[in-house]
Amino acid sequence: MDPISNKAEQLRDKIAQAERELQDLRRQLAELESSTRDANTEQGFDSVADPNQSAGTPLDWKWPLKEEEYSRYGRQLILPTVGIKGQLNLKSSAVLIVGAGGLGCPAAAYLAGAGVGTLGVVDGDTVEISNLHRQIAHSTSRVGMTKVDSLVEYCHGLNPEVTYIPHREHLTPQNAESIVSKYDLVLDCTDHPTSRYLISDICVLLRKTLVSASALRTDGQLIVLNNPPAAQGATDGGPCYRCVFPKPPPADSVVSCGEGGILGPIVGVMGVLQALEAIKLIAAGIGKEASSISKEPANPSLLLFSATSATPFRSIRMRSRRPNCFACSSDSALTLKELKSGSLDYVQFCGVTSPVNVLKPEERITVTEYNDILAKQPDKKHLLLDVREREHFNIGSIPGAINVPFSSLQSRNKSTTNNDSSRPEYIPESLPADAPIYVVCRVGNDSQLVTQRLKEMGLDRDGARFVGDIKGGMLAWKHEVDKTMPFT
Ligand SMILES: [Zn+2]
């Protein structure tokens, strides 16, 4: 027999064995149920409500899980990675999900389904219709409800055996200790660097393992941090988020899902992987003081997922704790007191993206002014540049606008000069030299930067031509001029 058939044969044997064991468990259970029912009937009373036992579970139940739980979790109970011990570990565990969005919904659903004892959810947002294509636990009828309540309602429907703890607020340096300290394991399901550093720091300080994931557009990443969750300075502890990413990405490079877009299944994949890592960790005994898990070398892997790549999953082995890490090294000055005091400004650390304000008032026009120009002088030559990305532009645009995506402008060589021979190709040759150029973007930030740039290139011909932007961008256009304009 070749090695593959041999392996398959072994697996079939194992499955048959597991099925026999399950059958035997069911038989024992059925026998026990019928004998207890008989005994109760003879004694003339029905089962008495016991807060620790579900209705119908007999009083003299001698098995570690409740009667219903053997049916509910049967399919995972028979797996060697879970088993009865792993299931009991799940049942006695408390897991915190930070962020009830695209990652948090699938992660919470699978953890609730798997039977964790306590599931906490932190989020301060409410459900919006634009969430629904990816945040699968929410629903159209729950738009406007807090995300926490919506997710708890969904999970409760899935598994009422779990204790759910709603935290209807965002995690802050002030509330982080009191919330996180109640749990054994934390899942970072948020979508901004600011919260990632805060969650990592509180997990280091409270010695909690952290399953961190992120997703944008068609890519995602996943890493298990602080595993094992040793004390600050201990070399056998796993690295924290700051060990892996000591510096946050530049603030202006951080793109939100609103701006950059996200494909639903991408966050779905990453959230499901978070739940999987969490179940593996808990079933193996994380969070238990007398943990029997062997101390793995503290080198986690960073899993990268790219849906458009020929090899969608790649894994990069990371180094262990950084000797000079701000949070988890021996010379770290990070303390709970300092964190709570607010002296660590996470927003500042991650950089502030304040609204762009680089143009003078006379260099800007309002959407209604531009609409008047269109209405009153339909023949007057001018150029409207729409600098949103092509996908945004294709969904809806002002008639006559020319699309020159901001990203393509940024990547152009800055050395373009002001003589006519270097006229950018997006300026039509037929455009009269004094015809105004207006720039519009999504909300009125990029348009200012582009206007400034066009002037630097000399396109305003030393003031002979008006070059300016449209305040508030296409969002203002939708609100004030054309309510039918689709805005994304
Ligand atoms: Zn660290």
Image (cartoon, rainbow, N blue to C red):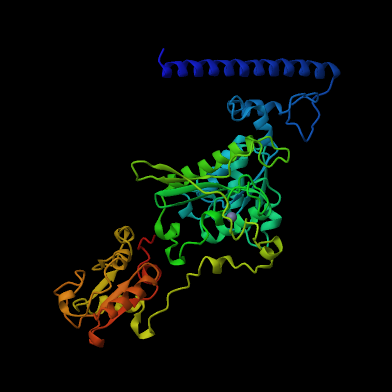
Q: Nearer the viewer, residue 96 or 67?
A: 96
* Figure quadrant of residue 199: bottom right
Left or right: 222 in relation to 77 = left
Q: What residue do we see at 14% from left, 73% from top?
A: 429
Tell me: 47 left or right of 260. Answer: right
Q: Can the viewer see residue 138 in this picture?
A: no
Q: Residue at 64%, 61% (x, y): give it.
A: 332
Residue 193 x/y as whole percent = 52, 59
> Is residue 293 rendered to the left or right of residue 45?
left
Name the image quarter holding the N terminus: top left
Q: Position of residue 244 (x, y in %)?
A: 52, 54
Judged from this view, the residue extending furthest toward the top is 1
Residue 377 image offset from top left, x and y in percent? 22, 79
x 54%, y 19%: residue: 15
Q: Nearer the viewer, residue 455 or 318?
A: 318
Please say if 5 is above or below 171. above
The outermost residue toward the bottom is 463
Q: Given the current orientation, which residue lies at the most extreme right position?
A: 43
Q: Which of the two residues, 434 or 197, is positioned nearer the viewer here?
A: 197
Viewer-side residue, 147 vs 21: 21
> How many numbered marks, from 0 up?
0
Which corner quadrant of the image does residue 461 belong to? bottom left
Q: Is residue 145 above or below residue 46?
A: below
Q: Residue 440, percent across and down? A: 33, 71
Could you tell me which quadrant the C terminus lies in? Answer: bottom left
State which image quarter holds ligand 1.
bottom right
